Image (tube, grey):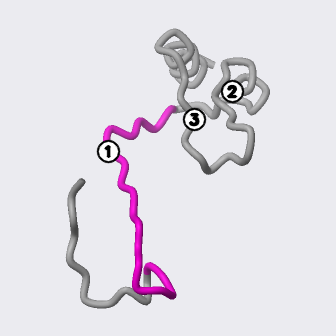
Amino acid sequence: MRRVVVDDLSGFSAMDDVLMTTFDNVMILPNPVRFATLKEYGAVGSSNLISATAVSNENLVRIVDAGWHQ
């Protein structure tokens, strides 16, 4: 876990407790991948499209391929 210092929490939370997540190694694909395709490859969580969802390496390659070569 890493910690960060901020001067004002109001931009992050209405409470004093804040949990933040950062992402690195984000790849922007040249073509959008259809929701049906993501669902087919198990990349759609059961609750919403915001939560992280684990996918197998094989399906990750399929998703990147779909977004790169459409």
As drawn, is 53 to the left or to the right of 11?
Answer: right
Residue for point 74% across, 38% down: 46
Instruction: From the image, give the main secondary structure of the stretch colored magenta.
Output: loop
As drawn, is 56 to the left or to the right of 4?
Answer: right
Res 24 label = 1
Counting from the top left corner in percent of width and height, residue 43 is at: 63, 28
> Label 2's element?
helix
Do the CB atoms of the residues marked 3 and 2 lie less than 8 Å apart?
A: no
Q: Disc 3 marks which residue?
A: 53
Counting from the top left corner in percent of width and height, residue 64 is at: 51, 21
Q: Earlier in the sequence, mark 3 or mark 1?
A: 1
User: Which contiguous range is marked in magenta?
Assistant: 12-29
> Label 3's element?
loop
> Label 1's element?
loop
The answer to whether 48 is drawn above or below residue 12 in the figure is above
Q: Earlier in the sequence, mark 3 or mark 2?
A: 2
Res 38 label = 2
The answer to whether 54 is drawn above or below residue 45 in the figure is above
What amino acid is at disc 3? Thr
Residue for point 57% across, 35% down: 53
